[in-house]
């Protein structure tokens, strides 16, 4: 349950990873953690690497929640792994604002559930059901969920290298 404290994203951003396909191959890179605190800047960065099928940004915050953002042309698709994060984290609130979803209040502040587009990766091989199941597994850290997504999409090794460079 939220204690009403609004946190700032700074050192709490675990990582920001960008992935996109070029000539049939996944390109994966670690981005500066500061991008994890500003949704607008992240989306601009994703647009700069359009790739085949758009660009995918994955942000983990405080080992607590993640945001997945996919930009394909003018289309922006977002997924917040835990809607309750919006009670404490500006990035999570920004995602809900962009999705036109009100932040949880009252009893809903304790109801962990994803918000946004669970189908944002279905055309790449991760079904809505699979992504929902991963988000619903409260025993997994965001890094583990996103690592499984990367594995299913075929860039697990590159994802691991990006995480290594982000934490080096």
Image: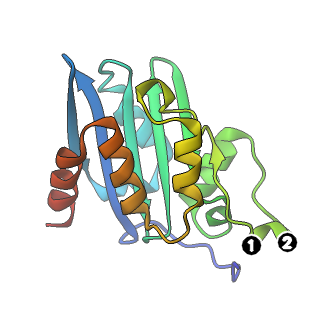
Residue 16, given in percent of the width and then of the height, sits at 33, 52
- Does 148 appear above or below 26? below
Q: Which residue is mark 2?
A: 107
135 sits left or right of 56 in the view: right
- Does 2 appear above or below 108? below
Asked if one can make out residue 99 in the rendered structure from this viewpoint, the answer is yes
Q: Quadrant of the C terminus?
A: bottom left
Callout 1: SS: helix
95 sits left or right of 23 in the view: right
Distance from disc 1 to disc 2, alpha carbons, whole Å, reads 6 Å
The numbered mark at residue 110 is: 1
Residue 29, given in percent of the width and then of the height, sits at 21, 43
Callout 2: SS: helix
Q: Quadrant of the N terminus?
A: bottom right
- Does 151 appear above or below 137? above
Within 10 Å of the Cα at label 1, are there few (<14), some (14-19), or many (20+) other Cα atoms? some
The numbered mark at residue 27 is: none
In the displayed image of the protein, which residue is found farthest to the right? 106
Q: Quadrant of residue 100?
A: top right
Q: Quadrant of residue 47?
A: top left
For the residues labelled 1 and 2, say whether their Cβ atoms are less than 8 Å apart: yes
In the displayed image of the protein, which residue is found farthest to the bottom? 3
Viewer-nearest residue: 4 or 116 = 116
Residue 86, given in percent of the width and then of the height, sits at 65, 62
156 sits left or right of 58 in the view: left
Identity of the residue drawn at 77% across and 62% down: 104
23 sits left or right of 103 in the view: left
Identity of the residue drawn at 36% across and 61% down: 143
Identity of the residue drawn at 46% across and 67% down: 140
Count of numbered labels shown in the rendering:
2
Identity of the residue drawn at 52% across and 33% down: 120
């Amino acid at each position: 349950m939220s204690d009403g404290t609004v946190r700032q994203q700074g050192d709490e951003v675990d990582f920001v990873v960008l992935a996109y396909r070029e000539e049939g191959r996944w390109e994966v890179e670690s981005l500066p953690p500061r991008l994890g605190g500003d949704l607008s800047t992240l989306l601009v960065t994703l647009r700069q690497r359009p790739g085949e099928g758009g660009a995918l940004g994955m942000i983990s915050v405080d080992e607590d929640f993640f945001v997945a953002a996919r930009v394909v042309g003018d289309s922006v698709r977002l997924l917040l792994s835990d809607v309750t994060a919006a009670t404490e984290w500006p990035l999570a609130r920004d995602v809900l604002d962009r999705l036109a979803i009100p932040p949880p209040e009252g009893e809903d502040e304790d109801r962990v559930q994803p918000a946004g587009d669970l189908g944002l990766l279905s055309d790449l091989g991760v079904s809505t059901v699979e992504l929902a199941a991963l988000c619903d597994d409260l025993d997994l850290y965001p890094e583990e969920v996103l690592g499984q997504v990367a594995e299913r999409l075929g860039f697990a090794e590159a994802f691991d290298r990006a995480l290594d460079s982000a934490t080096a």
